[in-house]
Amino acid sequence: MHRLSLFATVLFITATLIAQRNNDPHYGGCGAANGGGANSTNYYGGGADPCAYTYSVPAERLNQLLNDAGYCTMYSRTQVNCSRELKGNYGQIRLDRRDGAGMGGGKNPGSLAEASYPTVPPSAITPAQRADAERMFQRSLTLIERNQHREALPLLLQAGRLGHARAQATLGIAYQDGNGVRRDDATAAHWYGLAAAQGHRAAQYGLAGMYEEGEGGLPKDRVKANQLYLASANQGYDKAQLIIGMAYEVGDGVPRSRSRAIQMLRASGLGVNIANVLASPQTPARFANFNELGGYIRKLAEIENAKLNARIAASFPRPDVNRNPIDRINANKEMNDFQRARGADRPY
């Protein structure tokens, strides 16, 4: 049994895929009726580009902005396109058009094939840029909590290119799961890699899985995967601790150690039941591989389920047996009276 398959028997993870909205007119390109172009009133001055500036704006400030700034039009619930730089404070953050902000057109924003500018090296990022990146990331979280993944993406891309590790890890998840974009494993691996290099534990875990499976153009590399899983587990990431705990039990990429396995499984909070099984004196001294370990755990689960079902069944009386003695006496009397009435007691 593959260790990720064994992991799946312990923890079921469901991913919600957010549908693309390319055909929704509220999310069209700059030429859409609400974004500028022939059917829009968004023309400020002669020959002005109605989409020269694109901003992310808090939803609660959008109406005020549109009332005050006649040169801006709504692109989405939290984005506006403006023909010139926006004046005033509406909580706006300017978005980079190279990430597809305010453009639509059915593209997959930020994918590697469309990347037109590089990530700033961490050593070159200024304190002001770090502050801007954090502000963008916090805005993106608000949008994600509202399931507005598409609107969050330009903010995440800009923050990620400014070296924000949490934004980079979130981008890895977005491209791997298809949250607001089409799935793109190569781009997911790219962003996971940048965040993992900064020690982000969830990104290390995500990248480890991609190395283990050979996804996103990465080679299958169990050694690299184990290194990343271990780095993530040592930072307390529960899913990585679960995998490394089982790896210690069978000696997969790490020295075989039941005590370390039990310690890591319990620390994860996800593998406490497995740790208890391994700590039992009835458990075999060693398992050769994940298949053997998984088979033993499944067998114990089947035994426990059978015991549970038996206890449940025993707690309910059989429907054809009344265990109340008074009721049984009365029932017998009624049956005897009935038999006498129909002559069933007569000897023939």
Image (cartoon, rainbow, N blue to C red):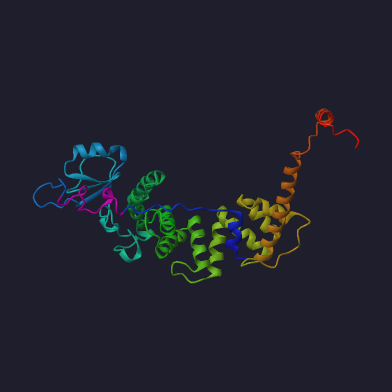
Q: Which residues are magenta?
A: 22-38
Res 236 visible: no
Can you give x and y, in whole percent of width and height, for residue 39 in the image? 16, 49
Judged left or right of residue 263, residue 143 is left
Residue 66's image quarter? top left
Q: Residue furthest left?
A: 46
Can you give x and y, in whole percent of width and height, for residue 12 in the image? 56, 53
Residue 304 is inside the magenta segment? no
Judged left or right of residue 164, residue 102 is left
Can you give x and y, in whole percent of width and height, for residue 115 in the image? 31, 63
Q: Residue at x 20, y 42 (%)?
A: 87
Res 254 visible: yes
Q: Residue furthest front?
A: 348
Judged left or right of residue 194, residue 6 is right
Judged left or right of residue 308, residue 99 is left
Q: Residue at x 64, y 54 (%)?
A: 265
Q: Quadrant of the C terminus?
A: top right
Can you give x and y, in whole percent of width and height, for residue 156 in the image? 36, 53
Q: Residue at x 30, y 60 (%)?
A: 107
Q: Quadrant of the N terminus?
A: bottom right
Image label count? 0
Majority secondary structure in the magenta region: loop
Q: Is residue 209 above or below residue 78?
A: below
Residue 23 is inside the magenta segment? yes
> Foreground residue, 143 or 88?
143
